[in-house]
């Protein structure tokens, strides 16, 4: 499909440390995203707009009311529903996206959808991989020694372990008392299998945007560089330092930026990548 006849389905999973947030909070952000998808990329002379883009935002069950893998199961069922209905059976029309904890769920979903190696053989996936993934400041690893307090970021590094423990449930107790073998479907950054990541990567790759000075920055950077070294198609966009280098700036900018140019700067980069 070319030009305005193209259409797209965006599957979005919100952030909030697995314990906060809803689709209602992200409504302005998602409506702005849809409007920019119809408008086209900034400065692009070609007709790149999408006709009537559809957005599906998942209100997954928050922790501690439910723990892993409930949220991943809900995301999987939602993705299946989207592919079979709105996308008319074609996963090539779907872009999956998420910010922060939602980005973690999206990465877990990609790993779950991909073939796994069992005793040297490849097991066929039950669902097809989406066309592209957009990750906004993804919480790639629930536990990491790289997390440090940032003077500019609004995320409290000390609270991350508590949020992770609520999401992990009983698994967090086992991790605290036994060997540190973390399920990669729970914490995708702990997956160091390059072959698995290559199978999980969408055909148009993963676009990752994060803040230069946010708490997650060192872990996201290390994860992306490791995947790139393994031949995984990961593109990164880093927001500059200061107030623009904080966590999930494309979302936060709608509330914090003082001009429309700044408010939608991060979203325009995402739309251009799509």
Image (tube, rainbow, N blue to C red):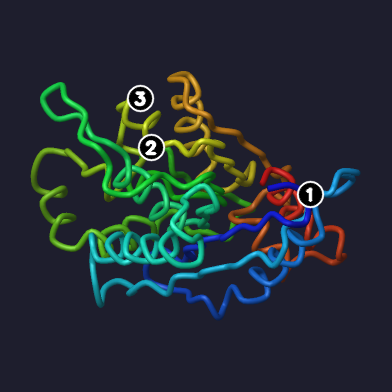
Other residues around mark 3 within 10 Å, as few (<14) / some (14–19) / many (≥20): some
Q: Nearer the viewer, mark 1 or mark 2?
A: 1
Name the residue beneath numbered marker 1: 48
Left or right of 173 in this view: 32: right
- Position in image of residue 213 (x %, y %): 62, 44
Residue at the spot 30% in from the left edge and 71% down from the top edge? 63
- Position in image of residue 224 (x %, y %): 50, 32
**How many marks can you see?**
3
Q: Nearer the viewer, mark 3 or mark 2?
A: 2
Name the residue beneath numbered marker 2: 200
Do the residues under discs 3 and 2 have CB atoms within 8 angstroms?
A: no
Name the secondary structure under disc 2: helix
Left or right of 12 in this view: 109: left
- Position in image of residue 209 (x %, y %): 61, 45
Name the residue beneath numbered marker 3: 194
Do the residues under discs 1 and 2 have CB atoms within 8 angstroms?
A: no
Other residues around mark 1 within 10 Å, as few (<14) / some (14–19) / many (≥20): many
Q: Quadrant of residue 145?
A: top left
Residue at the spot 31% in from the left edge and 65% down from the top edge? 71
Which circle's residue, 3 or 2, is located before the other in the chain? 3
Residue at the spot 44% in from the left edge and 53% down from the top edge? 157
Q: Residue furthest bottom?
A: 24
Q: Nearer the viewer, mark 1 or mark 3?
A: 1
């Amino acid at each position: 499909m070319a030009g305005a006849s193209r259409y797209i389905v965006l599957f979005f999973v919100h952030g909030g440390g697995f314990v906060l947030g809803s689709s209602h909070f992200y409504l302005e952000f998602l409506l702005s995203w849809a409007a920019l998808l119809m408008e086209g990329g900034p400065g692009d002379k070609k007709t790149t707009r999408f006709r009537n883009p559809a957005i599906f935002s998942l209100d997954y069950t928050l922790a501690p009311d439910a723990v892993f893998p409930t949220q991943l199961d809900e995301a999987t069922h939602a993705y299946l529903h989207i592919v079979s209905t709105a996308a008319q059976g074609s996963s090539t029309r779907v872009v999956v996206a998420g910010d922060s904890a939602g980005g973690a769920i999206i990465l877990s979903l990609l790993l779950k959808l991909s073939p796994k190696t069992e005793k040297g053989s490849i097991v066929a996936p039950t669902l097809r991989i989406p066309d592209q993934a957009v990750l906004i400041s993804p919480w790639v690893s629930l536990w990491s020694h790289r997390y440090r307090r940032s003077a500019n970021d609004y995320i409290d590094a000390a609270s991350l372990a508590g949020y992770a423990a609520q999401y992990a449930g009983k698994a967090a107790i086992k991790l605290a008392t036994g060997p540190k073998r973390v399920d990669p479907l729970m914490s995708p950054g702990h997956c160091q299998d390059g072959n698995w990541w290559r199978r999980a990567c969408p055909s148009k790759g993963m676009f990752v945007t994060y803040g230069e000075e946010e708490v997650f920055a060192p872990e996201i950077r290390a994860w992306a560089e490791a995947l790139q070294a393994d031949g995984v198609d990961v593109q990164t966009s880093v927001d500059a330092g200061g107030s623009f280098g904080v966590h999930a700036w494309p979302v936060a900018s709608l509330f914090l930026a003082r001009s429309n140019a700044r408010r939608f700067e991060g979203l325009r980069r995402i739309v251009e990548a799509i």
